[in-house]
Image (tube, grey):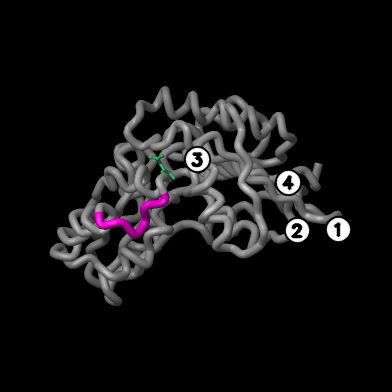
Amino acid sequence: MSNAPIGIFDSGIGGITIYKEIHSLLPMENIIYLADSKNAPYGGKSQEKIIEYSVKNTEFLIKNGCKLIVVACNTASTNAVKYLREHYKIPFIRVQPAIKPAALNSTTKNVGILATNGTLKSELLYETSQKFAQGVHVTEQVGEGLVSLIELGKTNSSEMIKLLNKYLQPMLLKNIDQLVLGCTHYPFLIPQIKKIVGKKVNILDSGEAIARQTKVILEQEHLINNSYTKVSRKFYSNGNTAVLQYFLDTFKENLKAEKINF
Ligand code: DGL
């Protein structure tokens, strides 16, 4: 079982930002990545729909032999992981917006969070803010339209820059010094975001923390891959593989995006 792959899924290509951290911390692990791009974005959908897609993704990964699943999507993590843990036996790792470190690091006591509507209205986010952001003012902003543009590969388009300015300028007026990226697609926008918020705002995403958590759980469950066979990494998309391929090519590791009908 320990040489079985780790499964990672997202509503699209955003979870690649999580894959990158997992592969860098656990290079010996086999990986299957699934981009449900056909159904992206999840952010504005009902919880029932998000659970339905998450179940479908989970079944695909389990059928392909995965030993653990990383739900590399904040929207699915906040809305569906509880259900998945109740219905499947393998371990699930969920992503969570980095509110706790942001609140701890903030000197202005003003923190911004950019996420999808599905994540911002979730119970889990509410609980996290209640628990870790006491005494800190959190400005929430729905990143409406950002995921769709990223899925089209339009990270540098004028539409993107316009939207980012619209969402971030009001946060700057509120004197934020920490910006939490509460969606795994958004780290692709860090260069563009930095140009808007400047050096005084620290940008936080959850990639490294998720990779560390994945390692802890694999160790705990005795699932770390100790066999020294060639590592296999597969990347599937049921949408536009060209965009997935574009982001995979940035790693310069000859990774291939494969199309699946699903
Ligand atoms: N990457 C997903 C997330 O982290 C995007 C959600 C969506 O599809 O709207 O929330």
Whole-number angstrom distance, CA of label 1 to CA of label 2: 8 Å
Is 118 above or below relative to 134?
A: above
Whole-number angstrom distance, CA of label 3 to CA of label 1: 33 Å
Mark toward the start of the polypeptide (1 vs 2): 2
Q: Is mark 4 on a helix, strand or loop?
A: loop
| Callout 3 touching callout 1 (CB < 8 Å) | no
Q: Is 119 on the left-hand or right-hand side of 244?
A: left
Q: Is mark 3 on a helix, strand or loop?
A: loop
The mark found on residue 240 in the picture is: 3
Mark 1, ligand 1, within 8 Å: the answer is: no
Residue highlighted by disc 4: 221
**Percent x, y for residue 49?**
42, 24
Figure quadrant of residue 104 = bottom left
Whole-number angstrom distance, CA of label 2 to CA of label 4: 17 Å
**Percent x, y for residue 38?**
47, 32
Mark 4, ligand 1, within 8 Å: the answer is: no
Looking at the rendering, the stretch of residues picked out in magenta corresponds to 153-158
Instruction: Please tell me how crowded label 2 is: few (under 14), some (14-19), or many (20+) other residues with Cα within 10 Å.
Output: some
Is 132 above or below relative to 85?
A: below
Which kind of residue does numbered mark 3 sit on?
A: Asn
Instruction: Please tell me how crowded label 3 is: few (under 14), some (14-19), or many (20+) other residues with Cα within 10 Å.
Output: many
Residue highlighted by disc 2: 28
